Image (tube, rainbow, N blue to C red):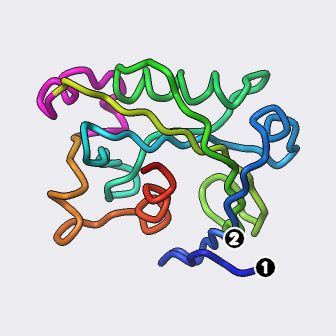
């Protein structure tokens, strides 16, 4: 299998697959969902205070949740947004030991995209509900050269044009 990217933590983004959303929900290793959020023609990132870098949005699937419900919940908590999320596909990762597990493991995640129009960065920043995790927002074009960005997340924005 050709790897897409290995990040500085050793996590491997192994593949991106266009399986159906229903089939993705049936994967036993499905652990999380992520959302690429576009604001007009730019990508939105949030500063994660626990990881000390900019990331896209999302989180872990809770017991009994579908992937779609998870991404709606996470984006509502993190950004105060809801809307019509477009399912883009399923990501496969080889994850290194971290605070979620002390073992190397394979995980799947669903990737979604959403475009927000007619909102400024200031307006979106005021909507953040979970200020324990997301401290500030920025547009990709303004941070890509000078700020730490999760490498895999930076690659994921390319799947939502």
**Magenta residues (range):** 120-135
- Rendering coords of residue 137 (x, y %): 23, 41
Q: Residue at x 15, y 57 (%)?
A: 142
Q: Is residue 14 above or below residue 79?
A: below
Q: Is residue 102 left or right of residue 75?
A: right
Q: Residue at x 68, y 33 (%)?
A: 61
Q: Residue at x 80, y 35 (%)?
A: 25
Queried whether the magenta region covers residue 132, the answer comes back as yes
Q: Which mark is residue 14?
A: 2
- Secondary structure state at the residue bearing disc 1: loop
- Secondary structure state at the residue bearing disc 2: strand
The residue lying toward the viewer, choosing from 14 and 60, is 14
Q: Is residue 59 left or right of residue 145?
A: right
Q: Is residue 85 left or right of residue 121?
A: right
Q: Is residue 126 left or right of residue 71?
A: left
- Rendering coords of residue 102 (x, y %): 72, 63
Q: Mark 2 touching mark 1, by CB under 8 A?
A: yes
- Rendering coords of residue 158 (x, y %): 45, 59
The residue lying toward the viewer, choosing from 128 and 98, is 128
* Quarter in which the N terminus is drawn: bottom right
Q: Which residue is mark 1?
A: 1
Which quadrant holds residue 154?
bottom left
Queried whether the magenta region covers residue 41, the answer comes back as no
**Mark 2 or 1, nearer chain start:** 1
Q: Residue at x 54, y 43 (%)?
A: 34
């Amino acid at each position: 299998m050709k790897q897409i990217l290995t990040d500085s933590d050793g996590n491997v983004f192994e593949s991106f697959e266009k399986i159906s959303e229903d089939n993705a929900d049936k994967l036993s290793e499905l652990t999380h969902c992520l959302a690429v959020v576009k604001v007009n023609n730019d990508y939105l990132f949030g500063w994660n205070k626990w990881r000390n870098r900019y990331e896209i949005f999302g989180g872990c699937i809770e017991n009994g949740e579908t992937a779609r419900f998870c991404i709606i919940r996470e984006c509502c908590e993190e950004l105060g947004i809801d809307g019509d999320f477009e399912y883009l596909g399923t990501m496969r990762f080889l994850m290194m030991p971290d605070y979620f597990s002390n073992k190397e493991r394979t995980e799947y995640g669903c990737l979604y995209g959403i475009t927000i129009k007619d909102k400024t960065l200031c307006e979106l920043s005021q909507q953040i509900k979970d200020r324990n995790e997301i401290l500030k927002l920025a547009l990709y074009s303004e941070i890509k050269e000078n700020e730490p960005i999760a490498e895999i997340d930076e690659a994921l924005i390319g799947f939502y044009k």
